[in-house]
Image (cartoon, helix red, strand yellow):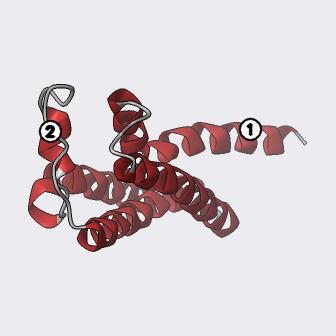
Amino acid sequence: MRILNWVWVFVGILGLISIRFLEDKIFYDPFLEYFRGDFKAAKIPEFDTRKLIVSLLFRFLLNLFFSALVIHFIFLKKRWTIQAVILMAIAFLFFFSIYLWCLFSKMEIGYLFTFSIRRFVIQPIILLLIIPIFYYRKKLNKYQ
């Protein structure tokens, strides 16, 4: 892989790290502090549904952009990048709907479950699954 490709991969990873470190400054999420503390004993914070949804969608789009950048410059296949974006979008919609249900039901299903689902919504965890899958796919294509 050329050095310029690795630079773009590094930029993508740096972008993902920046989103994580600046999350309390650029996103509306009253659950950041809630889940950092002893959330089992704390009261569920009040939240503005519209602001929370817009903020989570914005965060997802930023994560998606930087994740697509990483995938594109690792594999250099536009089709795979598109497939990864679609897969990440489907996963986000799935976990986002479950997360919203957990919030509106006052986390009746459990705090730990809500916390875990939230991780899939706000973090690019799916990227950590896609990269090994695509490496395996690349290896299989090499032998066929």
Is 100 left, or right, of 143 in this rendering?
left
Q: Residue at x 9, y 61 (%)?
A: 25
Going from N to C along the chain, the mark reached first, 2 or 1, is: 2
- Give x and y (percent) for residue 127: 49, 47
Q: Residue 82: percent from the left, percent from the top?
A: 63, 67
Rendering coords of residue 68 (x, y %): 49, 62
- Closer to the camera in the image, 37 or 41: 41
Viewport quadrant of the C terminus: top right
Query: Visible in this render: residue 76?
Result: no
Say left or right for 107 vs 73.
Answer: left
Residue designated by label 2: 43
Looking at the rendered image, the disc whose residue lies closer to the viewer, 2 or 1, is 2
Q: Does the residue at mark 2 contact the one at mark 1 (Cβ under 8 Å)? A: no
Q: Considering the numbered disc 2 on the image, is that residue within a helix, a strand or a loop?
A: loop
Task: Work out which residue is located at the far right of the displayed protein and give it.
Answer: 144
Give the image location of residue 79, x and y in percent. 69, 67
Q: In this view, does 86 lie to the left or right of 56?
A: right
Using the rendered image of the protein, determine whether residue 12 is visible from the camera's viewpoint: yes
77 over 134 or under it: above or below: below
- Label 1 crowd (10 A; few <14 / some 14-19 / many >=20): few
What whole-number distance in Å separates the C-alpha atoms at marks 2 and 1? Answer: 50 Å
The amino acid type, in three-letter code, at marker 2 is: Lys
Q: Quadrant of residue 140?
A: top right
Which residue is disc 1 drawn over?
139
Q: What residue type is labelled 1?
A: Lys
The residue sitting at 64% across, 69% down in the picture is: 78
Q: Quadrant of residue 47?
A: bottom left
Depth order, front residue of 67/47: 47
Residue at 65% across, 40% down: 133
Q: Residue at x 21, y 67 (%)?
A: 48
Graded by Cα atoms within 10 Å as few (under 14), some (14 to 19) or many (20 or more), the crowding at tag 2 reads few
Which of 65 and 49 lies nearest the eye of the viewer? 49
